[in-house]
Amino acid sequence: MKIKVVSNILKANDSIAEENRQLFKNNKLFVMNLISSPGAGKTSLLERTIKACNGKISIGVIEGDIATTRDAERIEKTGARVIQINTNGACHLDSNMIRTSLQNFPLNGLDILFIENVGNLVCPANFHLGEDIKAVVLSIAEGEDKPKKYPGIFREARVLIINKIDLLPYTDCSIDKIKNESLEINPDLNIFEVSCRSGDGLDRWCNWVKAQKEEKK
Amino acid sequence: MKIKVVSNILKANDSIAEENRQLFKNNKLFVMNLISSPGAGKTSLLERTIKACNGKISIGVIEGDIATTRDAERIEKTGARVIQINTNGACHLDSNMIRTSLQNFPLNGLDILFIENVGNLVCPANFHLGEDIKAVVLSIAEGEDKPKKYPGIFREARVLIINKIDLLPYTDCSIDKIKNESLEINPDLNIFEVSCRSGDGLDRWCNWVKAQKEEKK
């Protein structure tokens, strides 16, 4: 019974996600759904990416949070177009929240849309929003054992961004272990190693983002 | 409709939680439900606490994870009694999982039972398991803005353990901000600052844990 309810909810979600997908396609927009634990650095990654692409690519951001407009305020300072969704307790964004937010968020002129999901490494993996790809961000401070403990999102994602590599000397985390475990779950994962604090590794990431835009046009 | 289903699920959960609570009470057991984001350090905190209490308090652990038995294996090495629950994708423990696991987990002789929840700062807050208290663990690497972005668990918890304070010099995190925001949400929070890597702050925490056992007997 409980399982049937969940399956119905997911089916309804998928059908609205398809409508969103069509709308994004009509606007030739590349859409990325960013998923991670709380504090892995999704907003910092967006700030860095927007600044690096400044002028060359027009980026929009939908911010998902349980409460507060803090992340949208941070993005607003970069000059990017942004809207905040507050889920009021819900643990993930769903496709209907995206559809509703788009009524107040014009897509014209945008090249890339980032959707920053609620900080949660579990639930958002199951809810498609109409995005082109899901990307998972993992902070090395979370430890090297996370991919196999939270395999769902590593299976769903096309991209893994390993963040906070500046903290490597002060932890017991091995990047190789993260990469090996992730690739065992999903051999097609495209992996980036970055520090949003020092800036290391961001060039390669931003070039990849720009290339996605080119492919879409 | 969706809300009604959720409310029914929570009601059924609460009723089994009450049965668990009665069982724990009959065994004069102090039970703590440990909740945090993935990789905040719940298992490391348990390893440290068990070692510090060695011989003086008998500790049992129920490990909750989506997949793998890694955490139970780590706890087993400390000599503590432990059982692993795999939720197979579910984002939180519920009271029925605890009831079922207790069929294979004798409580006799234990003073304190820790239940380590699935790594998720959102969903576990709503599902009571029959515990005496919920404790939230926050790694300073997650950033100082987390309490107000994830207020549910900070409202539910009686204890906040701020972990990984050894990383403070290498981040932009302010412990005072974490404390102030947390106390604004919940003025009764008992706050501990620790590093499970260096051992800093663990004496005060372990003494507090021991005192809970004394109160219960």
Image (spheres, coloured by chain):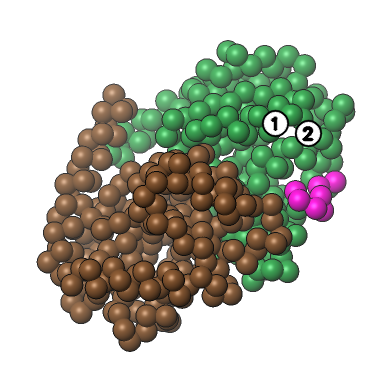
Chain colours: A brown, B green
Quarter of the rendering containing residue B10? top left
Q: Residue at x 55, y 68 (%)?
A: A195
**In the rendered image of this protein, does residue A37 appear above or below residue B215?**
below
Quarter of the rendering containing residue A10? top left
Q: Chain of mark 1?
A: B
Q: Residue at x 12, y 66 (%)?
A: A26
Spot the residue most to the right.
B56
- Where residue B16 sits in the image (x, y, percent)? 50, 22
Mark nearer the N terminus (2 vs 1): 2
Residue placed under numbered mark 1 in the picture? B75
> Which quadrant does the C terminus of chain A fall into?
bottom left
Q: CA distance from mark 2 to mark 1?
A: 9 Å
Which amino acid type is marked by label 2?
Ile
Q: Is residue A103 visible?
A: no
Q: What range is drawn magenta here?
A: B196-203
Q: Residue at x 33, y 86 (%)?
A: A55
Q: Which mark is residue B50?
A: 2
- Where residue A156 sits in the image (x, y, percent)? 35, 46
Q: Nearer the viewer, residue B93 or A137?
A: A137
**In the rendered image of this protein, does residue A105 appear above or below residue A15?**
below
Q: Residues within 10 Å of mark 1 (few under 14, many from 20)?
A: many
